[in-house]
Amino acid sequence: MSSTSTASVISPLTLKEAGYRSPKRCLAASFHKGRDKWKKKAQDRNKAIKVLKVHVHDLEESRQHHRQRAREAQESQGQLEHQVQQLQAEVEQLRAQRDELRRTLGSKKA
């Protein structure tokens, strides 16, 4: 809006009642300046909010990704622990067979 249209909307009586004694042109310029500052501040705030929302979204995505990797690692660890147990049991079984064979061979030599 132009300063003339703003000045015509505000009546002189209203300006006096509000306690303004400055000329309308000065008040209009001051009001425009204040409005522009307010708009700029609001735009900057909105940009900051948007940046933070994107950052939060990225962090949530990253967190979800790491949780999934942790679950997969736990499952893999469980499978590997099971394989280790099986292999340890097989080793024990083979040791027992070896000892049995040694006893058998030792008794035949004597």
Image: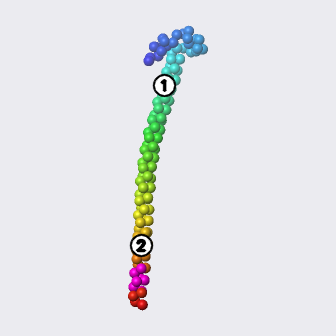
Residue at the spot of label 1: 36
Magenta-colored stretch includes residue 104: yes
The residue drawn where x is 44% and y is 18% is 1
- Report whether 9 appears left or right of 104: right
- Residue type at tag 2: Gln
**Quarter assignment of residue 58:** top left
CA gap, disc 1 and disc 2: 85 Å
Q: Which residue is mark 2?
A: 93
Give above or below for 99 relative to 88. below
| Residue lying furthest top | 13
Region rendered in magenta: 100-106
Q: Is residue 54 above or below residue 12?
A: below
Residue 90's x, y, as percent?
Answer: 41, 70
In this rendered view, identify the residue nearer to me: 93 or 12.
93
Q: Nearer the viewer, mark 1 or mark 2?
A: 2
Q: Alpha-carbon neighbours of circle 1 within 10 Å: few (<14), some, or many (≥20)?
A: few
